[in-house]
Image (spheres, helix red, strand yellow):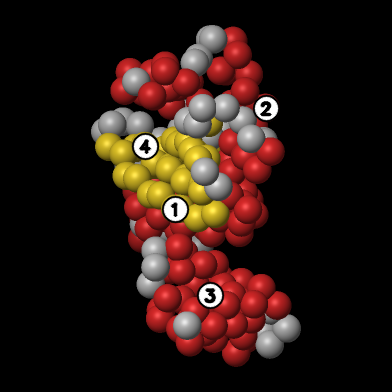
Amino acid sequence: MTRRFNLLLPSLLLLAACAAAPVSPGKADLPPEAKVPTVAVLEFEDHGIGQTVSTQGLGRTLSDRISEQLAGRPDLRLIDRESLQKILEELSFSSLDIADRDGQLRLGKLLGAQYLIMGGYTSLAGSLRIDGRIVEVEKGIAEGSSLEGRAAERTLLEKSFSKQMADQLVAKVGLPKGTAKSAQDFFLQGLTLEQSNNNQKALEMYQKALAIDPQHHEARERMENLLLKELK
């Protein structure tokens, strides 16, 4: 009995020491919502003279598409639309309030968001320009992004711009990019390059999209249009 106790004594002392040792707080001890960056995507503002048929509802659909790009990531938390709208209505936040540094800080704290995605769009003479920015609430640092094209191509511009903003946020926060690029990813990248008049690179992206999915009709159509332009 004594011999067995003597053999177990070192193990018992070690367990007691571990139990008594203070545990320093770390990331593993934080609640789940504190481990990941939190972002709120605000509805985009119309900076044009007035609503047109081509831009009707664009502010909301832009925020929806950006949210869709970011949704489902376990390393990122999105503020839902209902919570965001409730805060804005209860405190009577206007677009001017949110554009102000103090307003952004106040809104971010109320929502528990470290990042705000916001912006606006302008439609003029058949063209459409979308401007967005990612605001780091605590530091007051904002990074911008923009895209221009024809208003008739609103849907394509929405898709391209939303991915552009989502990728920019992921890079800014330092999150992993995720899975390999799909045909749609290459198509949207090509569209962005085409809008920037970088037609050669755009053609390369459309070709990559078609290599993955030969049935991607939008990529084929854009590529054929660019090739026709080159022949003129």
Q: Which mark is residue 82?
A: 2
Which residue in the protein does label 4 denote?
135
- Which of the 4 image quadrants contains residue 108? top left
- Comparing 168 with 75, the one in front is 168
| Upstream in sequence: badge 2 or badge 1 | 2
Q: Residue at x 68, y 87 (%)?
A: 214
Q: Label 4's element?
A: strand
Q: Residue 159, how many percent across, how many down? A: 59, 57
Q: Residue 52, how many percent across, how many down? A: 64, 35
Q: In the drawing, does residue 185 fall left or right of residue 140?
A: right
Which residue in the protein does label 1 denote?
147
Question: Is 45 above or below relative to 132?
Answer: above
CA gap between label 1 and label 3 equals 17 Å
Mark 2 packing: few (<14 Cα in 10 Å), some, or many (20+)? few
Mark 3 packing: few (<14 Cα in 10 Å), some, or many (20+)? many
Q: Amino acid at mark 3?
A: Phe
| Upstream in sequence: badge 2 or badge 3 | 2
Mark 4 packing: few (<14 Cα in 10 Å), some, or many (20+)? many
Count of marks overlaid on the render = 4
CA gap between label 2 and label 3 equals 33 Å
Q: Amino acid at mark 4?
A: Val
| Upstream in sequence: badge 4 or badge 1 | 4
Q: Residue at x 54, y 10 (%)?
A: 92
Is residue 93 in view?
Answer: yes
- Comparing 184 with 57, the one in front is 57
- Which of the 4 image quadrants contains residue 213? bottom right
Q: Nearer the viewer, mark 2 or mark 3?
A: 3
Q: Amino acid at mark 1?
A: Leu
Q: Residue at x 66, y 73 (%)?
A: 218
Q: Residue 79, how many percent across, how many down? A: 57, 35
CA gap between label 3 and label 4 equals 27 Å
CA gap between label 2 and label 1 equals 28 Å
